[in-house]
Amino acid sequence: MPEKELYVLMISTDRNIFLEGSDAQKRMQEYAALVKELHIIVFTKSGFKELPFAPNARTYPTNSLSRWLYVSGAYFLAKRLFWAGNQSDISLITAQDPFETGLAGFFISRTLRRPLHLQVHTDLFAPTFRRGSFINFLRVPIAKFLFRQSASIRAVSERIKTSILHKMKFAVNRSPRVTVLPVFVDAEKFINTPPSFDLREEYKGFDLLVLVVARLEKEKNVLGALRLLEDTYRAKPNLSVGLVIVGSGSQEKSLRKHAARTGLGGAVFFQGWQSDLVSYYKTADLLLVTSEYEGYGRMFVEAAASGCPVLTRDVGAARDILASWNSIICPEKDRVCLLRNLKNLASDRTLRETLLATARAGVKRIKFPTKEEYLAAYKRMWEEAAENDAFAPLI
């Protein structure tokens, strides 16, 4: 049977697609190579222009006056571009999330009479997600509605797939197709690239040098990492633990103030956003993850491929990616477990050196997908989604 040509319409919020040479645009060019045509409608404020970024791909801005007009702007733009005389070349509408872009995708799919595909990158049923903001509180019922209308869903981890199927309680014969396709991380780069600097040389004298890689936003709970460090010093005043924080975000100022106020200033080092994460992972003693929730957690792959041990809560795809020989995974809400293991690693040199050695040796045991394998899986996902019946809402 000849391969069906796909004409995909994507709804996105990523304005970096308009930036020449950006990672986002390069990623979309790779996706465009999988299909006959790729069209991307991006939620934007005014000031953007329609842009062809590949021979068969083009991105369109909504140029909305307000964020509250993104959904309607995307809908009317799609209707003008792709609906004429009861026909459309579009094979599939894929939305970046099951929230605002998903809602726009739903209305478009009903007008163009084409299947809708939702991508889920966050654990939206985690209690801390709903409590994170008023917008998140509104997004959960939107997602629940859309999950009952869409015939196909992509989840970036088994945790998210299980959460969706458990929380929604679909009837057996009405359960949607949920494909698990993790976020691609170029593990080979982390495996093969030598470090360009050594954190231990830069920050000497610490028994344990701990790394945090995160956006400095509330859900990443970097404040929790600072408090663990504070409690470790309180319990073990003779130990010396350093905390290197890589990332930027709206909480940076308050986190710096907290570190200074609690007397941790000499042990906490804010590095800002960094493009060279290889050197951080390969020269730190431990990656610490204190996030309230994660959709996937690319830092788990990056650390595992770099041979950096991980101490984490059970969030995102931690259990899908990590193993006992390169990590310590604590129950999601068990702060005591994190603190106990942090103190043990700081005070027991043999323990931390053993964990570091097994993490480094175990890199060769992990099978990381190649870019080619990932893109092939991505294409299969779209092909399967395009075959689904978009007009049999799930109840």
Image (cartoon, rainbow, N blue to C red):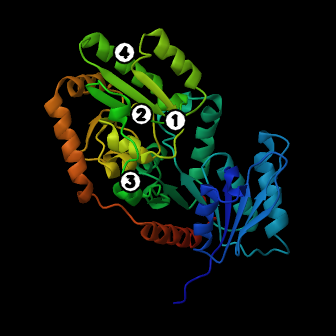
Q: Which residue is mark 1?
A: 247
What amino acid is found at the position of numbered circle 2 in the picture?
Answer: Val
Residue appearing at x 68%, y 52% in the figure: 16
Residue appearing at x 33%, y 40% in the figure: 283
Q: Nearer the viewer, residue 68 or 222?
A: 222
Mark 1 and mark 2 lie on one chain; the one further toward the N terminus is 2
Q: Which residue is mark 2?
A: 212
Q: Which residue is mark 4?
A: 230
User: Disc 2 on helix, strand or loop?
Assistant: strand
Q: Which residue is mark 3?
A: 190
Label 2: few (<14), some or many (≥20) within 10 Å? many
Asked if residue 49 lies left or right of residue 204, the reply is: right
Q: CA–CA distance between discs 4 and 3?
A: 31 Å
Mark 4 and mark 3 lie on one chain; the one further toward the N terminus is 3
Mark 2 and mark 3 lie on one chain; the one further toward the N terminus is 3
What amino acid is found at the position of numbered circle 3 in the picture?
Answer: Phe
Q: Can you give x and y, in whole percent of width and height, for residue 207 in the image?
A: 25, 25
User: Disc 4 on helix, strand or loop?
Assistant: helix
Q: Quadrant of residue 273?
A: top right
